Image: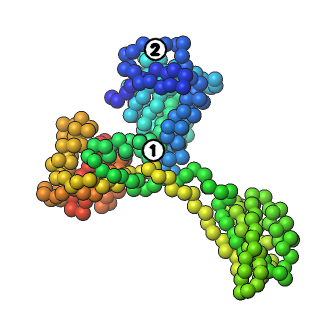
Amino acid sequence: MLSSRVHLVPKTVRLVHSLIYNSSSSFMDLKALLSSLNDFASLSFAESWDNVGLLVEPSPPHNVNTLFLTNDLTEKVMEEALQKKADLILSYHPPIFRPMKRITWKTWKERLVIRALENRVAIYSPHTAYDAAPHGVNCWLAKGLGVCTSRPIHPSKAPDYPTAGTHRVEFNVNHTQDLDEVISTVKGISDVSVTSFSTRVDDEEQTRISLNCSRQALMQVVAFLSRNRQLYQKTEILSLEKPLLLHTGMGRLCTLDESVSLTTMIDRIKAHLKLSHVRLALGSPKSKLWPCALVLGAVFCRDQRLTFTSQVRCPIMIFWMLLPKE
């Protein structure tokens, strides 16, 4: 059972052993604490399929004096958290993943929700947000490989677009068309921002119109432009992408400064994770490791689902540490 307790002081989080005293004189409001957790690792880093964030919330106001940490929130862990008088449980894996149609005493996950609400205990899960975060779980695992440079295998995208809108529409207006009317019409569409500048096309002075718009506004812009054949035929529509975030994302591709033997790598990982043994699928016992891929969680490999904490690959070997499937 992996669990720990946190004693909260305003604007400060200090890890303490679960047997250390708990003072009721210091606490944080739940919303303020959630804001601090999001500053540490934004929930926008999480995978789209994941269920992260605040999963169970007591009626407000809710002050948090004791934060209980666990890898998996089971009924035994819930009992321990209640004994420690926890106000918030941070469970790495989300105890609620699929939608619940009812809350009864029938299943253990439903019982967790009931006990949490009855005892005014909030439940929060970061899961893949912590996997992807800079200096998150994957980065911590990468430290066990040795001196290396690493980058995300699947980089995260920024939560917002750097400019307004999801699409950009560009077209030219020549001297035969009413420039003021065109600009006035597109500006009259909601969720549209317009810029214009002079340009020269085939020795003819024209005005280049560039506008950013939302997906909904795009339909109205296209409808307007389609009524003018000259404008519509030379219109360019670009789909904007959210920028990738450096050092943030799922998995890590690690390039070791020096190649090492498989035995050396296993010894390093065992020492880093304080494990007496790991499971290994071996391609060649004399393989030298140079580029390594590390992934936390689940993966599909040759049509078999493997749940593992890390994976190290090169063309002739596969290495992983198995944990019970979620």
The residue carrying pointer 2 sits among few (fewer than 14), some (14 to 19) or many (20 or more) residues within 10 Å by Cα, namely some
Q: Residue at x 28, y 43 (%)?
A: 144
- Please, is residue 187 above or below residue 40 in the view? below
The residue carrying pointer 1 sits among few (fewer than 14), some (14 to 19) or many (20 or more) residues within 10 Å by Cα, namely many
Q: Nearer the viewer, residue 140 or 301?
A: 140
Q: What mark, if any, has residue 133 been given in the picture? A: 1
Residue 275, percent from left and from top: 22, 37
Q: Is residue 55 left or right of residue 308?
A: right
Q: Mark 1: which amino acid? A: Ala
Q: Residue at x 21, y 55 (%)?
A: 259
Classify the position of the C terminus by image quarter.
top left
Residue most extreme to the bottom: 202
> Disc 1 on helix, strand or loop?
loop
> Disc 2 on helix, strand or loop?
loop
Q: Nearer the viewer, residue 60 or 269?
A: 269
- Please, is residue 104 above or below residue 7 in the view? below
Residue tagged by mark 2?
Answer: 22
Sequence order check, earlier mark of 1 and 2 = 2
